[in-house]
Image (cartoon, coloured by chain):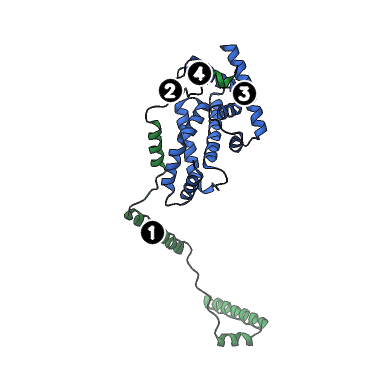
Amino acid sequence: MEKMIEEKLMDDLKNPQRRSRAFGQLVKEYQQPIYWHIRKMVLSHDDANDILQNTFLKAWSALDTFRGESKLSTWLFRIAVNESLTFLTSQREKFNVSIDELQENLSQSLEADAYFSGDEVQLQFQKAILTLPEKQRLVFNMKYFDNLKYEEMEEILGTSVGALKASYHHAVKKIEQFLLREI
Amino acid sequence: MDLNNYFDKSNPFTVPENYFQDFQAKMERMTRPVTFPWYRQVRSWAAIAAAVAGIVIGTHFMFPTQPAVQPLTEEENYVLSQVDEPALADYLASMDQSTTSSSSQETK
């Protein structure tokens, strides 16, 4: 989003009379990138839909505390990341399973997902990504699919650029090893 | 193996038809400001006024106000200043004795 438009949107969001309309614009602008980011983390459309809704409702109720120190997109991504990680943790606790078991469950449900249109190679690729620890998966998705800069990722995840680069490098190595074994 | 060349980065996930339009409409409904018609606003103000009146009246009955102590008149002040405390105590004691003796004579 252009800087001028973003500044106008921020002003409107702070104005109680124009807030609701401006928030509609915000949803229109960012719902898709944020949805796809969440979807790649939780895989199921229904879960992604719930998390996306929570993300925007949290943003709506926190508008008064948003000081505009970061970009709106960074702020929304940060909320979405927290909501996704909280969801995955709650799933583990709810079903009393380990991280590996949860990843195995996600992998199986992906095969039966009506809203997954990938071929066999893409399915294997998603399974390989699922073998990564959650935070490393976040880093990999943001860099590989969303093509975010490390500086933007640093703002969203609160992790230094050096650590993010190392994390991405390890993620790529792990995925390559998995695929060499499986394909 | 180079991941960037091995896989296309096309999105393998899909969403239900019109999902994003529907989601946006849902969010607009959920964040629309709620405006009440005038009679509902008047009704809520009337309810608040009735509640306040109830509290005020209830407090009045539960904690009745004590009558204020009347200040002494100049004349009373003068009389009291002329009498010292031991003399007053003696006077009151003698008054007690006389009333008890007169009542005992009446009973005889």
Chain B color in figure? green
The circle on residue A23 is none
**Distance between the Cα atoms at labels 3 and 4?**
17 Å
Tag 3: amino acid: Ala
Q: Which mark is residue A115?
A: 2
Q: Nearer the viewer, mark 2 or mark 4?
A: 4
A161 sits to left or right of A62: right
What subunit carries mark 1?
A: B
- Residue B88: quarter of image: bottom right
**Separation (CA) of disc 3 from disc 2:** 26 Å
CB under 8 Å between discs 2 and 4: no
Q: Which residue bears the numbered disc 1?
A: B50
Measuring from the top left, give residue A142's x and y in whole percent: 56, 30
Label 2 and label 4: CA atoms lie apart by 14 Å
Q: Is residue A104 above or below residue B46?
A: above
Q: Is residue A101 visible?
A: no
Query: In the structure shown, which secondary structural element does the residue marked by tag 1 occupy?
Result: helix
Q: Nearer the viewer, residue B49 or A5?
A: A5
Indicate left or right for B22 with A182 as reference.
left
- Indicate which label's residue lies in the foreground, 3 or 2: 3
* Same chain shared by disc 1 and disc 4: no
Q: Which mark is residue A171?
A: 3
* Disc 1/disc 4 C-alpha distance (Å): 68 Å
Mark 1–mark 3 Cα distance, whole angstroms, equals 67 Å
Q: Chain drawn blue, letter?
A: A
Residue reaching furthest to the front: B5
